[in-house]
Image: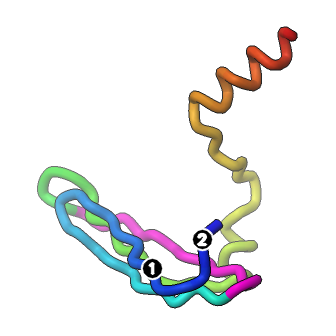
């Protein structure tokens, strides 16, 4: 979730890419990332997307949970 306003989303690696977005309140934004060939690592390219494209690609995906959150959940479950 991002606060309304101007935001710059970036990838860093063999190549740096920046996607500038103006976030409006109560809107959902979709972004896609394509990984291209690089010499030592992949080259990420981020760009705007839409819900239809996301829905096609999202089948079978699960939300990522940071390891710390999983540890906290396991501790909470034991209580």
Residue 53 x, y percent position in the rendering: 66, 80
Looking at the figure, which quarter contains the N terminus? bottom right
Q: Which residue is mark 2?
A: 2
Residue 44 seen: yes
State the extent of the magenta-drawn residues as a range. Answer: 25-37
Q: Which residue is mark 1?
A: 7
- Picture layout, residue 78 above or below residue 27: above
Judge from the rendering whether residue 45 lies leftward or rightward of residue 7; answer left or right. left
Crowding around mark 1 (Cα neighbors within 10 Å: few <14, some 14 to 19, many 20+) is: some
Q: Identify the mark nearer the N-term, 2 or 1.
A: 2
Tell me the element at label 2: loop
- Picture layout, residue 5 above or below residue 17: below
Check residue 44 for magenta coloring: no
Q: Nearer the viewer, residue 29 or 61?
A: 29
Residue 30 x, y percent position in the rendering: 62, 78
Residue 52 seen: no
- Residue located 65% across and 21% down the image: 71
- Residue located 45% across and 69% down the image: 33
């Amino acid at each position: 979730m991002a606060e309304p306003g101007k935001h710059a989303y970036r990838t860093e690696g063999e190549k740096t890419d920046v996607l500038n977005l103006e976030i409006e309140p109560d809107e959902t934004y979709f972004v896609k990332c394509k990984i291209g060939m690089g010499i030592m690592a992949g080259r990420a390219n981020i760009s705007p997307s839409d819900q239809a494209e996301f829905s096609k690609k999202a089948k079978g995906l699960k939300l990522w949970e940071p390891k710390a959150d999983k540890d906290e959940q396991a501790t909470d479950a034991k209580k």
